Amino acid sequence: MAESAEQVYERVMSVADAEGRLPLPEIAGWDVFPWEVVDGVLRPKVLAPPAPEKPRNGEAGTVGCHACAVPDERVVWEDEHWQLIHLGGPSGLPVVLMLNTREHLDAGELSDDLASELGRITNRLVRIIEGLDGVGRCHVNRWGDGGRHFHLWFFGRTKGLATILGSYAVEWDEVLPPVPEDLWRDDLHTIATKLANWGGDARY
C-alpha cells in the first residue's frame, strides 16, 4: 500500500530542521547548478565563457560506457532492444527509472522501428506509473550531456504535495529522504509485470 501525501509529509518533516527545511542535496555543489547565494540573496551564477564540449561517458564506444555495463540487479524489465533500469535504490520520489537501448546508440540514431518501439513503451510506462497509488504524474525527460548511450528518464512524482510540481520534481528527488524500500520494490514489481504484458521479461 502506497504512502498517502500526509504520510509522506510526516516522514519528510521528521528529518527536517527546526524551520522544516531539508539539507541541500549534492547537486547544489555541481558546476552546472545555476544558482548561488551572494550577500544573502539567491542569484544566478555568472555565465562561464565559451569552451569546448567535454567528452560524454561512452563517447569513445562501448568500453567504459555505464549503460552498456548495467548490473543485472538494476534491471527492472528488458527485451531484445531495451532495458528499463533503476538507479540502485529508492530516492525521494516514488519512481525514478531509465529506459536504455541495449545497442550503443545516441538519440537521433534510432532506426524508425526502434523509434516506434520507444513511443509505444513510453506511452505504456507513463500509463503504468501514473496508475500507481501515490503517484500524481509521470514526467519523461531526455538529456544527453552526461552520457552518449541513449537513455530516457521517467519520474513518478508524489501525489498531493503541491510544492513538488513540474520540472523541479527532479530536484526534489535529490532533496527528499528516500521512500521506504518495501514500497519502492512493490512499485518496481508492478511496473515490470504490467509492462511484460506486452512482451519482454519482468525482472522484479
Image: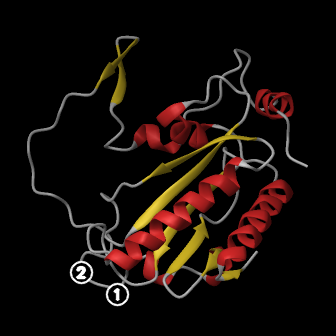
Disc 2 target residue: 60
Give the color scheme: rainbow, by chain, secondary structure or one colour: secondary structure
Residue 142 versus residue 115 in the image, above or below: above
Asked if residue 35 lies left or right of residue 10, the reply is left
Residue, far right:
1
**In the structure shown, which secondary structural element does the residue marked by tag 1 occupy?**
loop
Q: Which mark is residue 63?
A: 1
Q: Amino acid at mark 1?
A: Val
The answer to which of 203 and 17 lies nearer the viewer is 203
Q: Name the residue: 32% across, 71% down.
A: 57
In the image, residue 84 lies at what x, y percent?
Answer: 58, 71
Q: Amino acid at mark 2?
A: Ala
In the image, residue 115 lies at what x, y percent?
Answer: 38, 70
Circles 1 and 2: CB atoms closer than 8 Å:
yes
**In the structure shown, which secondary structural element does the residue marked by tag 2 occupy?**
loop
Q: Name the residue: 44% across, 82% down.
A: 68
In the image, residue 156 lies at what x, y percent?
Answer: 64, 47
Quadrant location of residue 190?
bottom right
Quadrant location of residue 19?
top right
Q: Name the residue: 51% across, 78% down.
A: 82
Quarter of the figure with the C terminus = bottom right
Neighbour tally class for label 2: few under 14, some 14-19, many 20 plus, Cα within 10 Å? few
Asked if residue 74 lies left or right of residue 32, the reply is right
In the image, residue 160 lies at what x, y percent?
Answer: 74, 28
